[in-house]
């Protein structure tokens, strides 16, 4: 089977079936190593607190890493491709308890609240900047919010894609 070839003389990249079967595991492993930016929500057993975080790797591996330093059981409640962390931190700053841990229960179910926040035209509003003083962290949050808002105008959210472009009564 000639999987790869080119018209250039002296340049043969054809692959035999045996070579192809040897290369496939390598290609699959390489594909698995590609880092996908992911925003996640982690819950802590016995607590209303949730952690809004970001990883460039597997959220389950990140959860295992977080669990090492926690006496209470942590669980991955939600994840979505893309880096929404700064914008979500900015949006939910009034509900921050400490660091990346938030109590979103006054707003409803934390998973639904976060999902709603990343939907275009809902929740994450770049004008909700608040009155925090200028700082590097604030500037980073503003940049994240701006990127998220610009992207939201151009493409459907992962949740909208899941529902075929419609929200099935969730609007």
Image: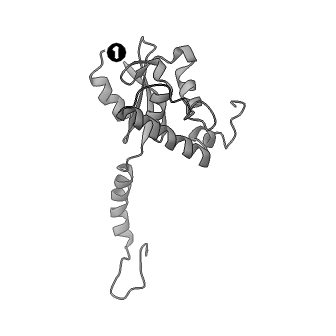
Asked if one can make out residue 78 in the rendered structure from this viewpoint, the answer is no
**Residue at the farthest left position:** 69
Residue 105 placement, left or right of 122: left
Q: In front here: 13 or 48?
A: 48
Count all numbered tags in the image, as a single digit: 1
Residue 137 on image: x %, y %: 37, 32
- In this rendering, the answer to whether 153 lies above or below 25 is above
Q: Give the vertical position of 89 relative to 4 (above or below).
A: above
Q: Looking at the image, which is closer to me, 56 or 68? A: 56
Q: Who is closer to the viewer here, 158 or 89?
A: 89
Q: Quick one: SS at disc 1?
A: loop
Q: Residue most toward the bottom?
A: 9
Q: Nearer the viewer, residue 47 or 13?
A: 47
Q: Which residue does the image show at 37% across and 60% down from the upper left?
A: 24
Percent position (x, y) of residue 63? 36, 29
Q: Point out residue 157 in the picture as x, y percentages from the top left corner.
A: 58, 41
- Residue at image position (64%, 36%) is 121
Label 1, residues with CA under 10 Å away: few <14, some 14-19, many ≥20: few
* Above or below, comparing residue 9 to residue 19 in the picture: below
- Most extreme residue toward the top is 46
Q: Residue at x 46, y 23 (%)?
A: 93
Residue linked to disc 1: 72
Is residue 87 visible to us here? yes
The picture places residue 171, in percent across and down from the top left corner, at 70, 31
């Amino acid at each position: 089977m000639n999987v790869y070839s080119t018209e250039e003389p002296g340049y043969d990249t054809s692959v035999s079936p045996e070579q192809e079967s040897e290369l496939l595991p390598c290609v699959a492993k390489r594909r698995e190593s590609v880092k996908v930016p992911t925003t996640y929500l982690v819950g802590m057993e016995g607590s209303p607190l949730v952690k809004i975080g970001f990883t460039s790797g597997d959220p389950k591996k990140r959860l295992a890493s977080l669990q090492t330093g926690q006496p209470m059981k942590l669980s991955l409640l939600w994840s979505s491709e893309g880096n929404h962390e700064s914008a979500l931190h900015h949006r939910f700053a009034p509900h921050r308890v400490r660091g990346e841990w938030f109590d979103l229960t006054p707003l409803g179910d934390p998973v639904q609240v976060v999902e709603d926040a990343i939907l275009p035209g809902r929740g994450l509003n770049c004008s909700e900047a608040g009155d925090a003083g200028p700082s590097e962290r604030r500037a980073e949050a503003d940049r994240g919010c701006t990127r998220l808002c610009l992207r939201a105008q151009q493409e459907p959210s992962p949740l909208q894609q899941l529902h075929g472009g419609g929200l099935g009564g969730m609007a």
